Amino acid sequence: MFITTQAPQDPQILSLIPIMAQASAMLFDEYQNYCAGGEGFLIDHKEDQSPVTQADLKINQFILKELAQHDPRLPVLSEESDHSERLNWSQCWMLDPLDGTKEFIHQRDEFTINLSLIHEHQTIFSMIAVPCEHVIYLGYLTETPYKYDYEQHNWSRHCKYKQQQQDAVQIGLSHRSKHAHYQEYLDLIAQEQPVIRREAGSAYKFCMMLEGEIDIYPRFHPTSEWDTSAGQGLLESIGGGLVDLSGRPFTYNQRDSLLNSGFIAFRGAESQALALNALEQLAL
Protein backbone atom coordinates (compact mmCIF):
# COMPACT_ATOMS: atom_id res chain seq x y z
CA MET A 1 0.00 0.00 0.00
CA PHE A 2 1.03 3.62 -0.49
CA ILE A 3 0.43 6.50 1.92
CA THR A 4 0.65 10.22 1.23
CA THR A 5 4.07 11.74 1.82
CA GLN A 6 6.16 14.80 1.09
CA ALA A 7 8.00 15.12 -2.21
CA PRO A 8 11.51 13.65 -2.07
CA GLN A 9 14.46 16.03 -2.24
CA ASP A 10 16.81 13.65 -4.05
CA PRO A 11 18.32 15.54 -7.03
CA GLN A 12 18.20 12.55 -9.37
CA ILE A 13 14.54 11.88 -8.66
CA LEU A 14 13.64 15.53 -9.10
CA SER A 15 15.44 15.74 -12.44
CA LEU A 16 14.06 12.47 -13.83
CA ILE A 17 10.42 12.93 -12.82
CA PRO A 18 9.73 15.67 -15.42
CA ILE A 19 11.30 13.52 -18.14
CA MET A 20 9.19 10.46 -17.34
CA ALA A 21 6.04 12.47 -16.74
CA GLN A 22 6.32 14.16 -20.11
CA ALA A 23 7.17 10.89 -21.86
CA SER A 24 4.17 9.24 -20.19
CA ALA A 25 1.86 12.09 -21.24
CA MET A 26 3.18 11.84 -24.82
CA LEU A 27 2.56 8.10 -24.88
CA PHE A 28 -0.96 8.58 -23.52
CA ASP A 29 -1.65 11.04 -26.34
CA GLU A 30 -0.35 8.53 -28.88
CA TYR A 31 -2.64 5.88 -27.41
CA GLN A 32 -5.69 8.12 -27.52
CA ASN A 33 -4.91 8.97 -31.12
CA TYR A 34 -4.55 5.30 -32.01
CA CYS A 35 -7.77 4.29 -30.22
CA ALA A 36 -9.63 7.06 -32.03
CA GLY A 37 -8.59 5.47 -35.32
CA GLY A 38 -5.76 7.88 -36.00
CA GLU A 39 -5.24 7.85 -39.74
CA GLY A 40 -1.78 6.79 -40.80
CA PHE A 41 -0.69 5.49 -37.37
CA LEU A 42 2.41 3.45 -38.18
CA ILE A 43 2.89 -0.14 -37.04
CA ASP A 44 5.87 -2.12 -38.31
CA HIS A 45 7.56 -5.38 -37.39
CA LYS A 46 11.11 -6.15 -36.31
CA GLU A 47 13.24 -9.03 -37.59
CA ASP A 48 11.78 -11.31 -34.90
CA GLN A 49 8.27 -10.30 -36.11
CA SER A 50 7.44 -8.49 -32.86
CA PRO A 51 5.51 -5.26 -33.49
CA VAL A 52 6.92 -1.77 -33.14
CA THR A 53 4.80 1.36 -33.46
CA GLN A 54 5.43 5.03 -34.08
CA ALA A 55 4.77 5.50 -30.35
CA ASP A 56 7.68 3.18 -29.39
CA LEU A 57 10.04 5.17 -31.59
CA LYS A 58 8.77 8.62 -30.62
CA ILE A 59 9.04 7.98 -26.88
CA ASN A 60 12.42 6.32 -27.30
CA GLN A 61 13.82 9.32 -29.15
CA PHE A 62 12.47 11.75 -26.56
CA ILE A 63 13.84 9.88 -23.53
CA LEU A 64 17.24 9.29 -25.14
CA LYS A 65 17.58 13.02 -25.80
CA GLU A 66 16.54 13.93 -22.26
CA LEU A 67 18.80 11.35 -20.60
CA ALA A 68 21.76 12.62 -22.62
CA GLN A 69 21.16 16.06 -21.16
CA HIS A 70 20.61 14.64 -17.66
CA ASP A 71 23.97 12.81 -17.64
CA PRO A 72 25.86 12.59 -20.94
CA ARG A 73 28.37 10.14 -19.44
CA LEU A 74 25.81 7.34 -19.04
CA PRO A 75 24.94 5.19 -22.09
CA VAL A 76 21.40 3.90 -22.61
CA LEU A 77 20.57 0.29 -23.36
CA SER A 78 17.21 0.67 -25.08
CA GLU A 79 15.02 -1.85 -26.84
CA GLU A 80 14.69 0.53 -29.77
CA SER A 81 18.32 1.67 -30.16
CA ASP A 82 21.74 0.28 -31.01
CA HIS A 83 23.48 -1.35 -28.07
CA SER A 84 26.32 -3.19 -29.78
CA GLU A 85 28.89 -1.82 -27.30
CA ARG A 86 26.88 -2.61 -24.18
CA LEU A 87 29.15 -5.33 -22.74
CA ASN A 88 31.79 -2.65 -22.22
CA TRP A 89 29.45 -0.68 -19.96
CA SER A 90 29.76 -1.10 -16.19
CA GLN A 91 26.88 1.31 -15.68
CA CYS A 92 24.01 2.26 -17.96
CA TRP A 93 20.36 3.14 -18.19
CA MET A 94 18.05 0.38 -19.36
CA LEU A 95 14.96 1.56 -21.22
CA ASP A 96 11.81 0.12 -22.71
CA PRO A 97 9.93 3.13 -24.11
CA LEU A 98 6.73 1.10 -24.57
CA ASP A 99 6.52 -2.11 -22.61
CA GLY A 100 3.37 -3.84 -23.77
CA THR A 101 3.27 -2.89 -27.43
CA LYS A 102 0.80 -5.71 -28.04
CA GLU A 103 -1.43 -4.40 -25.24
CA PHE A 104 -1.27 -0.96 -26.86
CA ILE A 105 -2.21 -2.37 -30.28
CA HIS A 106 -5.10 -4.38 -28.82
CA GLN A 107 -6.33 -1.23 -27.04
CA ARG A 108 -5.68 -2.54 -23.55
CA ASP A 109 -4.40 0.22 -21.28
CA GLU A 110 -1.92 -2.04 -19.42
CA PHE A 111 1.29 -0.71 -20.97
CA THR A 112 4.18 1.09 -19.31
CA ILE A 113 7.48 2.89 -19.77
CA ASN A 114 10.32 1.12 -17.97
CA LEU A 115 13.55 2.86 -16.98
CA SER A 116 16.23 1.54 -14.65
CA LEU A 117 19.82 2.27 -13.73
CA ILE A 118 22.19 -0.70 -13.91
CA HIS A 119 25.45 -0.71 -11.95
CA GLU A 120 27.77 -3.73 -12.10
CA HIS A 121 24.90 -5.89 -13.46
CA GLN A 122 22.42 -4.95 -10.70
CA THR A 123 19.40 -2.68 -10.85
CA ILE A 124 19.97 0.13 -8.36
CA PHE A 125 17.24 2.60 -9.38
CA SER A 126 13.88 1.97 -11.08
CA MET A 127 11.00 3.86 -12.65
CA ILE A 128 7.80 2.48 -14.19
CA ALA A 129 5.33 4.95 -15.67
CA VAL A 130 1.71 3.94 -16.28
CA PRO A 131 0.41 6.44 -18.86
CA CYS A 132 -3.29 5.58 -18.61
CA GLU A 133 -3.23 6.06 -14.83
CA HIS A 134 -0.93 9.12 -14.94
CA VAL A 135 1.34 7.69 -12.26
CA ILE A 136 5.00 6.77 -11.92
CA TYR A 137 6.44 4.20 -9.50
CA LEU A 138 10.06 4.86 -8.65
CA GLY A 139 12.84 4.40 -6.17
CA TYR A 140 16.24 3.14 -5.18
CA LEU A 141 17.00 -0.48 -4.35
CA THR A 142 17.92 0.44 -0.77
CA GLU A 143 14.76 2.46 -0.02
CA THR A 144 11.02 1.91 -0.15
CA PRO A 145 9.59 3.23 -3.44
CA TYR A 146 7.49 6.28 -4.20
CA LYS A 147 4.41 6.71 -6.37
CA TYR A 148 3.86 10.04 -8.09
CA ASP A 149 0.61 11.20 -9.68
CA TYR A 150 1.87 13.72 -12.19
CA GLU A 151 -1.58 15.13 -12.97
CA GLN A 152 -2.49 15.82 -9.34
CA HIS A 153 1.14 16.39 -8.28
CA ASN A 154 0.65 14.02 -5.35
CA TRP A 155 3.41 11.94 -3.80
CA SER A 156 2.92 8.75 -1.82
CA ARG A 157 5.30 6.13 -0.48
CA HIS A 158 5.10 2.40 -0.07
CA CYS A 159 4.31 1.46 3.49
CA LYS A 160 5.93 -1.71 4.77
CA TYR A 161 3.55 -3.76 6.80
CA LYS A 162 3.35 -7.30 8.08
CA GLN A 163 1.77 -9.38 5.36
CA GLN A 164 -1.34 -10.95 6.83
CA GLN A 165 -2.38 -14.49 6.15
CA GLN A 166 -4.85 -14.29 3.28
CA ASP A 167 -7.74 -16.52 2.34
CA ALA A 168 -6.49 -16.62 -1.24
CA VAL A 169 -3.24 -15.96 -3.08
CA GLN A 170 -3.38 -13.65 -6.10
CA ILE A 171 -1.52 -14.94 -9.15
CA GLY A 172 -0.65 -12.55 -11.97
CA LEU A 173 -0.58 -13.89 -15.51
CA SER A 174 -0.24 -12.37 -18.94
CA HIS A 175 -3.26 -12.46 -21.24
CA ARG A 176 -1.38 -14.94 -23.42
CA SER A 177 -0.34 -17.34 -20.62
CA LYS A 178 -2.00 -20.41 -22.13
CA HIS A 179 0.81 -22.96 -21.80
CA ALA A 180 0.02 -26.01 -19.66
CA HIS A 181 2.81 -25.12 -17.20
CA TYR A 182 0.80 -22.15 -15.96
CA GLN A 183 -2.22 -24.22 -15.02
CA GLU A 184 0.01 -26.86 -13.43
CA TYR A 185 1.69 -24.16 -11.36
CA LEU A 186 -1.63 -22.68 -10.25
CA ASP A 187 -2.87 -26.16 -9.32
CA LEU A 188 0.20 -26.73 -7.12
CA ILE A 189 -0.34 -23.45 -5.28
CA ALA A 190 -4.06 -24.23 -4.94
CA GLN A 191 -3.10 -27.30 -2.90
CA GLU A 192 -1.88 -24.88 -0.23
CA GLN A 193 -4.23 -21.90 -0.63
CA PRO A 194 -7.15 -20.88 -2.81
CA VAL A 195 -6.01 -19.04 -5.93
CA ILE A 196 -7.31 -15.85 -7.52
CA ARG A 197 -6.14 -15.49 -11.12
CA ARG A 198 -5.45 -11.92 -12.30
CA GLU A 199 -4.56 -11.25 -15.95
CA ALA A 200 -2.73 -8.11 -16.99
CA GLY A 201 -0.16 -7.05 -19.55
CA SER A 202 3.48 -6.07 -19.51
CA ALA A 203 5.30 -4.63 -16.50
CA TYR A 204 1.94 -3.36 -15.29
CA LYS A 205 1.82 -6.57 -13.25
CA PHE A 206 4.80 -5.35 -11.21
CA CYS A 207 2.84 -2.21 -10.36
CA MET A 208 -0.10 -4.36 -9.26
CA MET A 209 2.30 -6.25 -6.99
CA LEU A 210 3.43 -2.99 -5.38
CA GLU A 211 -0.24 -2.17 -4.80
CA GLY A 212 -0.92 -5.56 -3.18
CA GLU A 213 -3.12 -6.75 -6.05
CA ILE A 214 -0.81 -9.60 -7.12
CA ASP A 215 1.24 -11.82 -4.79
CA ILE A 216 3.03 -14.09 -7.28
CA TYR A 217 3.82 -13.60 -10.96
CA PRO A 218 5.13 -16.69 -12.82
CA ARG A 219 6.54 -16.41 -16.33
CA PHE A 220 7.54 -19.54 -18.24
CA HIS A 221 8.23 -17.97 -21.62
CA PRO A 222 11.02 -15.52 -22.51
CA THR A 223 11.20 -11.82 -21.80
CA SER A 224 14.01 -9.34 -22.39
CA GLU A 225 16.11 -7.60 -19.78
CA TRP A 226 14.36 -4.24 -20.23
CA ASP A 227 11.05 -5.99 -19.43
CA THR A 228 12.12 -7.02 -15.92
CA SER A 229 14.90 -4.79 -14.61
CA ALA A 230 12.78 -1.92 -13.25
CA GLY A 231 10.15 -4.25 -11.83
CA GLN A 232 12.73 -6.44 -10.13
CA GLY A 233 14.37 -3.44 -8.50
CA LEU A 234 11.06 -2.14 -7.16
CA LEU A 235 10.03 -5.55 -5.83
CA GLU A 236 13.38 -6.06 -4.12
CA SER A 237 13.05 -2.66 -2.47
CA ILE A 238 9.86 -3.79 -0.68
CA GLY A 239 11.23 -7.17 0.40
CA GLY A 240 10.02 -9.15 -2.61
CA GLY A 241 12.00 -10.29 -5.60
CA LEU A 242 12.31 -11.90 -8.98
CA VAL A 243 14.31 -15.09 -9.57
CA ASP A 244 14.98 -17.41 -12.48
CA LEU A 245 13.63 -20.93 -12.50
CA SER A 246 16.69 -22.07 -10.54
CA GLY A 247 15.95 -19.57 -7.78
CA ARG A 248 18.64 -17.00 -8.64
CA PRO A 249 17.92 -13.27 -9.03
CA PHE A 250 18.34 -11.90 -12.54
CA THR A 251 21.48 -9.86 -13.26
CA TYR A 252 21.77 -7.48 -16.18
CA ASN A 253 23.93 -6.58 -19.17
CA GLN A 254 26.49 -9.31 -18.75
CA ARG A 255 25.39 -12.06 -21.17
CA ASP A 256 25.67 -12.20 -24.94
CA SER A 257 21.90 -12.43 -25.20
CA LEU A 258 19.46 -9.92 -23.72
CA LEU A 259 16.76 -12.58 -23.51
CA ASN A 260 15.71 -13.76 -20.07
CA SER A 261 14.72 -17.28 -19.20
CA GLY A 262 11.52 -17.83 -17.27
CA PHE A 263 11.10 -16.36 -13.81
CA ILE A 264 9.02 -16.22 -10.66
CA ALA A 265 8.29 -12.83 -9.07
CA PHE A 266 6.93 -12.53 -5.54
CA ARG A 267 5.73 -9.68 -3.33
CA GLY A 268 7.16 -10.73 0.04
CA ALA A 269 8.58 -13.50 2.19
CA GLU A 270 5.31 -15.39 2.57
CA SER A 271 4.53 -15.37 -1.14
CA GLN A 272 8.17 -16.25 -1.88
CA ALA A 273 7.95 -19.46 0.14
CA LEU A 274 4.70 -20.45 -1.53
CA ALA A 275 5.96 -19.55 -5.01
CA LEU A 276 9.27 -21.40 -4.77
CA ASN A 277 7.75 -24.47 -3.12
CA ALA A 278 5.37 -24.83 -6.07
CA LEU A 279 8.24 -24.24 -8.50
CA GLU A 280 10.25 -27.10 -6.96
CA GLN A 281 7.35 -29.47 -7.63
CA LEU A 282 6.77 -28.31 -11.18
CA ALA A 283 8.13 -30.58 -13.90
CA LEU A 284 9.63 -28.11 -16.40
Image: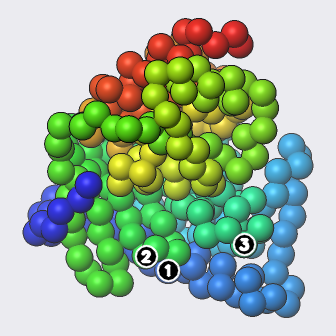
- On the image, the x and y values in percent for residue 115 come to 46, 53
Callout 3 crowding tier (Cα within 10 Å): few <14, some 14–19, many ≥20: some
Residue at horizontal 57%, vertical 49%?
198
Q: For residue 14, which numbered disc appears in the image?
A: none
Q: Amino acid at mark 3?
A: Gln
For residue 281, side relative to residue 135 (left or right): right
The first of marks 1 and 3 along the sequence is 1
Nearest to the observer: residue 188 or residue 125: 188
Name the residue that disc number 2 marks: 134
Name the residue that disc number 3 marks: 107
In the figure, 228 relative to 181: above or below? below
- Secondary structure under tag 2 reads loop
- Secondary structure under tag 1 reads helix
Q: Considering the image in quadrants, where does the C terminus appear?
A: top right
- Secondary structure under tag 3 reads loop
Q: CA distance from mark 1 to mark 3?
A: 17 Å
The first of marks 2 and 1 along the sequence is 1
Name the residue that disc number 1 marks: 25
Nearest to the observer: residue 200 or residue 123: 200
Residue at horizontal 39%, vertical 70%?
135
Q: Which label sits in the foreground, 3 or 2?
A: 3
Q: Which label sits in the foreground, 1 or 3?
A: 3
Give the colour scheme shown. Answer: rainbow
Residue at horizontal 52%, vertical 37%?
195
